[in-house]
Amino acid sequence: MTEEIEFETYIRISTKVIGIYVFDKKKLKNLYFDEKNYEIEKENNFEILISFIEENIFRIEKSIGKFVNNISLIVDNKKISNLNFCLKKKNYEKNLSIPYIKNIVTEAKDLFKENYQQQKIMHIVIEKYLIDGNEYKKFINNFRCDNICLEIKFISISNDLILEIEKVMERYQIKVINFIGENYIRSMFKENDIELSLMANKILSGYNENEVSIVPKNPKKKGFFEKFFQLFS
């Protein structure tokens, strides 16, 4: 019987495709997958989603010998937003440090939550560092500087869409533990032959070192910032 820790289940909801993938974390490939193409008759057709899960979930549970209790949702929808925040700070400590960057990101996160209360953050990505007027793409520890400006991208999804999806999942006693932006993860991989589930697994495992993880609490592999930030929602 397959142990739960050995696989992850992903459900994809995009504008024209619904998919479900059971991903083997050791072999890095799908144990099970199914996709359905459809034309949307209305913005969110949850009857299609219900029918699709009904067709697949019991087959999956029978094949792996366990109940599917948790899934990660890969979503592409008009109700996903991309917003950039720029925060400029005087660096009185002079040396650039992880705790200092952490404080700036935390402040940006609090500002986002205060101003966009109807949105749930899916991804926080540090797009660039402007250090004393010079642009850097990666963090440099103990870098001496007087001023720093962070450009931080927030990828979020509306709470009402989350509520509708979670209602569907509750029919099958399934909890959504991660919300993942499909366009975001595809932008991180140029290879067209990589499975979507493998992309998602890599992202959740810290593939993008400029992403601040806010969801997984016990990942097998932690990204660079996740080791320090632990900014859980």
Image (tube, rainbow, N blue to C red):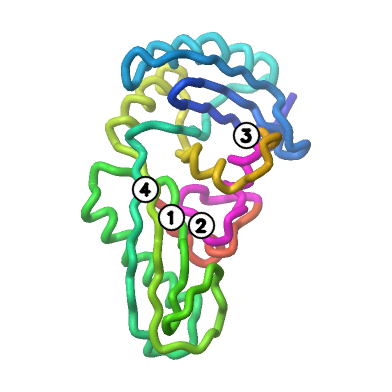
Q: Quadrant of the N terminus?
A: top right
Q: Is 214 covered by the magenta stretch?
A: yes
Residue identified by numbered label 4: 82
The foreground one among 126 and 68 is: 126
- 9 vs 118: above or below: above
Residue depicted at 55% across the width and 84% down the height = 142
Does the stretch in magenta take in 215?
A: yes
C-beta proximity under 8 Å, tags 4 and 2: no
Mark 1 or mark 4, whichever is nearer to me: 4
Comes first in the chain, label 1 or label 3: 1
What residue type is disc 3 on? Answer: Ser
Q: Main secondary structure of the magenta part?
A: loop
Crowd tier of the residue under label 2, counting other residues whose Cα lies within 10 Å: few below 14, some 14–19, many 20 or above:
many
* Residue 119: quadrant of the picture: top left
The residue sitting at 50% across, 33% down in the picture is 74
Which residue lies under the disc numbered 2? Answer: 211
The amino acid type, in three-letter code, at marker 2 is: Glu
- Please say if the residues under marks 1 and 4 sit with CB atoms less than 8 Å apart: no
Please state which amino acid type lies under the numbered disc 1.
Ile
Mark 2 and mark 3: Cα distance apart in space: 18 Å
Q: Which mark is residue 197?
A: 3
| Numbered circle sitting on residue 124 | 1
Mark 2–mark 1 contact, CB under 8 Å? yes
Query: Where, by quadrant of the figure, is residue 232 drawn?
Result: bottom left
